Amino acid sequence: MALIRLDEPTTKRIPPDTFSLWALAFRPFYLLAALFAAIAVPVWAVAYSGAIELPMPGIWWHSHEMIFGFAIAVIIGFLFTAGRNWTGLDTPTGKPLMVLAAVWLAGRLAMAFG
């Protein structure tokens, strides 16, 4: 008869003095995706009505930002979390995660003001 092991996973624990936002990759990317969607969709609706002009035609801007802005942030957060759980390997935390989030944010700002 085969036994099923019920041990705790051997992943590294987050120190209690760590700021939680940068402790796991899904946290900043899911938060940024939610904030981005809450801002980008109303901006696109206003642009679609003709009240403001975007750096490119409205439908192209909307499709680009929903794929490369919103969806990519969610996918990155999911894959970093799933990869950590599936492989047991550490994923970026702390400053490396901050840099990745900043690169994503820089792309969104470049599209908004480019």
Image: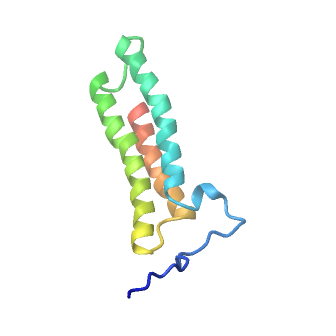
In the rendered image, residue 90, in percent from the top left (x then y), is placed at 48, 72
Give 110 or 37, whichever is nearer the viewer.
Answer: 37
In the rendered image, residue 27, in percent from the top left (x then y), is placed at 54, 53
Query: What colour scheme governs how the chains and residues are painted in the rendered image of this protein?
Result: rainbow
- Give the residue displayed 37% in from the left and 51% down from the top: 75
In the rendered image, residue 64, in percent from the top left (x then y), is placed at 30, 35
In the rendered image, residue 34, in percent from the top left (x then y), is placed at 49, 39
Give 75 or 53, whichever is nearer the viewer.
Answer: 75
- Give the residue displayed 71% in from the left and 66% down from the top: 16
- Can residue 45 be spotted in the picture? yes
Give 56 or 74, whichever is nearer the viewer.
Answer: 74
In the rendered image, the vertical position of residue 16 relative to residue 60, given as above or below: below
For the C terminus, the image quarter is: top left
Is residue 6 found left or right of 72 in the rendered image? right
In the rendered image, the vertical position of residue 63 relative to residue 74, given as above or below: above
For the N terminus, the image quarter is: bottom left
- Give the residue displayed 45% in from the left and 61% down from the top: 81
Query: In terms of image quadrants, where is residue 89?
Result: bottom left
In the rendered image, the vertical position of residue 97 relative to residue 7, given as above or below: above
- Give the residue displayed 53% in from the left and 57% down from the top: 98
Q: Residue furthest front?
A: 1
Query: In terms of image quadrants, where is residue 54?
Result: top left
In the rendered image, the vertical position of residue 68 relative to residue 78, given as above or below: above
